[in-house]
Amino acid sequence: MIIFSHAKINLFLDILGVDSVDHYHFLDSLFQEVSLADEIHIEESKSDSVVFEHLDITGDTTVNKALRLFKEKFAVKENFSIRVKKAIPAGAGLGGGSSNAATVLGALSKITAIPEDEVLELGQKIGSDVPFFFTGGLCRVRGKGEIIEPLKKRLDNIFFLIVYPNISISTKWAYSLVNNEKREKLLEKFLNNLSFNIQWLKNTAYNKFEAFVFPASPGLLEARIRLDELLSAPVSFMSGSGSSLVFAYSEEKEAKKAGKTVRDQSAYPAFLCRPLYRG
């Protein structure tokens, strides 16, 4: 079986506080699934194995956890070979690891004929972003990532250029920087707009991490300033806890032109993406 594990970007991301018991943070965020994707191959095998092609990734990855938890919960005796061809950068705020876990769990549920709704709780044990990837599309995500509200509206003629500035950001480190005393924007006021177009995104886009991560990561701040000047996008923002920088355009040709500019004038990987929806 060959499946695709898509990235997400955060159009809006506020951090409301932290649970004193488990230390997970409470969020209010707008997740958008995008077309950038890893390719995952799964097949039954004599023994379990997880391989990330052309990458030196070892240890207890989200894919290893997904396979192990699935087999333990449902007493599955079959073994599986899983190969992952990565396109989504790691430590980039794009949810690549979480997407991989959700995609593998979904695939295993199909292979073994175990209903997917019985698998959902396993995702929460792996990471707070994992539950979103069982739904995808455009969703408001709250709580500690477990409250998923799919939105009926879709982005109107918006194209994304995602630039990875060759800097990996630790999510744990980024959260350690955040001060939760101040709220700058409330998401509710933006959800009733008639059209989710580029002007709407310009008004809505917000990431609380930016105020804390940029000052603590001079290289990332320098990349942001340089790319903003170079690309002149109508809207730009950081995704998740970083480090990916997202540049939004109302015309695909402008996004493609911006991608060429990044490739010609920097060493940063750049990915032209469209919003992705299911069903």
Image (cartoon, rainbow, N blue to C red):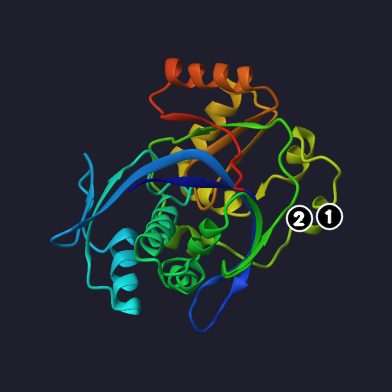
Front residue of this view, candidates 260 and 236: 260
Residue found farthest to the front: 113
In percent of width and height, residue 116 lies at 48, 66
146 left or right of 69 in image: right
Residue 186 at least partly seen: no
In percent of width and height, residue 239 lies at 55, 46
> Residue 264 falls in which quadrant of the image?
top left
Q: Secondary structure at mark 1?
A: helix
**Which of label 2 and label 1 is nearer to you?**
1
57 left or right of 31 in image: left
Label 2 to label 1: alpha-carbon separation: 9 Å
Q: Is residue 22 above or below residue 155?
A: below
> In the image, what residue occupies the spot 54% across and 82% down?
20
* Identity, as a three-letter code, of the amino acid under mark 2: Lys
> Residue 172 falls in which quadrant of the image?
bottom left
* Identity, as a three-letter code, of the amino acid under mark 1: Lys
The reply to whether discs 2 and 1 touch (Cβ–Cβ < 8 Å) is yes
Residue 271 at least partly seen: yes
The residue to which callout 2 is attached is 185
The residue to which callout 1 is attached is 189
Q: Is residue 206 above or below residue 250?
A: below
57 left or right of 33 in image: left
In percent of width and height, residue 220 lies at 47, 40
Q: Secondary structure at mark 2?
A: loop
Front residue of this view, candidates 51 and 44: 44
> In the image, what residue occupies the spot 52% across and 64% down?
131
Residue found farthest to the bottom: 21
Q: Is residue 92 above or below residue 187?
A: above
